[in-house]
Image (cartoon, helix red, strand yellow):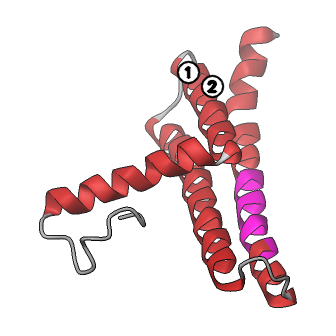
Amino acid sequence: MDLKDKEQVGKNSSFFDSFKYAFKGVLTAFQEERNMRSHILIGSIVLILCAFLDLTINEWLWVLFSIFLVVIMEIWNTVIENVVDLVTGDTFHPLAKKAKDMAASAVLLTAGFSIIVALIIILPKLWQILF
């Protein structure tokens, strides 16, 4: 539910409404956040690459887990940034900066985790193909 949905202030009336607003949130993050688009693009490239590699089911699970985790963390980062901006407005506050920096660090660490997963799973398979 976004700010334009002023007529609704309580719970969603149906499961479909909940799904609709959740999907709208993902779409908003994709449209408004450059980093989200970057994560989706890189994740898509990795998935296309993995389709040509002989991954086991466990390897697929680790790759998918790491991609989805980065996307989820980027959404949480955006949520935290928006809430902090809502509360502080145009005013600088050191705690607001701390919260935003820590939220961004969660995305950074998760992206690092994804790179480690790629190095462990994808790199050896590419190495075998190329050399």
Position of residue 109 measured from the top left corner of the image (x, y, whole percent)? 76, 61
42 shown above or below 70: above
SS for callout 1? helix
| Residue type (three-letter) at the residue carrying disc 1 | Ile
Q: Residue furthest top?
A: 130
| Secondary structure mostly taken by the magenta-highlighted segment of the chain | helix
Residue closest to the eye, 98 or 63: 98
Q: Quadrant of residue 57?
A: top left
Position of residue 49 measured from the top left corner of the image (x, y, whole percent)? 61, 21
Q: Which residue position holds label 2?
A: 45
Crowd rating for badge 2 (residues with CA inside 10 Å; few <14, some 14–19, many 20+):
few
| Residue type (three-letter) at the residue carrying disc 2 | Ile
Q: Quadrant of residue 2?
A: bottom left
Residue at point 45% right, 50% down?
26
* Span shown in magenta: 101-113
Q: Quadrant of residue 17?
A: bottom left
Q: Which residue position holds label 1?
A: 48
Position of residue 56 measured from the top left corner of the image (x, y, whole percent)? 49, 33
Residue closest to the eye, 120 or 42: 42
Whole-angstrom CA distance, mark 1 to mark 2, is: 5 Å
**Could you tell me which quadrant the N terminus lies in?**
bottom left
101 left or right, relative to 125: right
Residue at point 72% right, 67% down?
106
10 left or right, relative to 96: left
CB atoms of marks 1 and 2 within 8 Å: yes
126 shown above or below 78: above
Q: Residue furthest left?
A: 14
Q: Is residue 105 magenta?
A: yes
Residue at point 71% right, 79% down?
89
